[in-house]
Image (cartoon, rainbow, N blue to C red):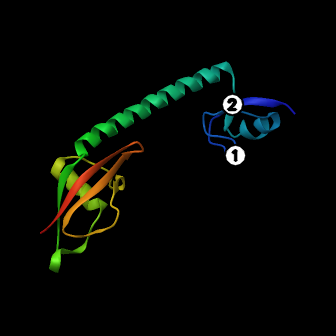
Amino acid sequence: MSILKIVLMKDVPGQGKSGDVINVADGYARNYLFPRGMAVEASSGKMNELAVRRQVQATKEMKIEQEARSLAGRLDKLKLIVLAKQGEGGKLFGSVNNKDIADALAVQHKIKLDKKKLVVKEPIKHLGVYTIVAKLHPAVQAEIIVEVVGE
């Protein structure tokens, strides 16, 4: 049984993720991984190509993180006013959710933000001031101050 050094082109359960360089049995590589396009032999050309691809990916991820940090700078401690219908004692009809906050952010500050990035710990059912976290990137988050006022 001989061992072959390969580069994974796709994630392979139990072996590794795309771009990993691993050693596998020759038969496993030739009969299973290569025909399915899951791996290629680790030649010097492929290794160079892999290094370039990783560099491009790192640059792209750094740019995305910088954009998230820039947006976080604009969002941090931003005050947002959300109008809601209220009943007696400051209790709301229904509740204020992520979509309402995202819509108010777009209207009041011209910032479009996906509602899935807003973390509302529990439904807002009363008038008042709340702090909402916006998770913009795994390493970047911002706090938005939301004031819920009655219509």
Between 64 and 142, the one lying in front of the other is 142
Residue at 29% x, 60% y is 99
Residue at 53% x, 23% y is 52
Name the side, left or right, on which 59 lies relative to 87. Answer: right
Tell me if I can see residue 87 in this picture.
no
Q: How many neighbours does mark 1 have within 10 angstroms: few (below 14), some (14-19), or many (20 or more)?
A: few
The number of numbered badges drawn on the structure is: 2
From the viewer's perspective, is the residue at label 2 or at label 1 nearer? 1
Question: Which residue type carries mark 2?
Answer: Val
Question: Which residue type carries mark 1?
Answer: Gly
Name the side, left or right, on which 81 lies relative to 58. Answer: left
Tell me if I can see residue 41 in this picture.
yes
Q: Secondary structure at mark 2?
A: strand
Residue 115: give x, y in percent of width and height: 32, 55
Q: Earlier in the sequence, mark 2 or mark 1?
A: 1
Name the side, left or right, on which 69 lies relative to 61. Answer: left
Q: Which quarter of the rendered picture does the C terminus lie within? A: bottom left
Residue 81: give x, y in percent of width and height: 16, 58
Residue 75: give x, y in percent of width and height: 24, 46
Query: In this figure, which residue is indicated by the disc labeled 2?
Result: 40
Q: Secondary structure at mark 1?
A: loop
Quick check: 31 above or below 131? above
Residue 3: give x, y in percent of width and height: 81, 31
Mark number, residue 14 = 1
Q: How many neighbours does mark 2 have within 10 angstroms: few (below 14), some (14-19), or many (20 or more)?
A: some
- Cβ atoms at labels 2 and 1 below 8 Å apart: no
Q: CA distance from mark 2 to mark 1?
A: 17 Å
Quick check: 142 above or below 126? above
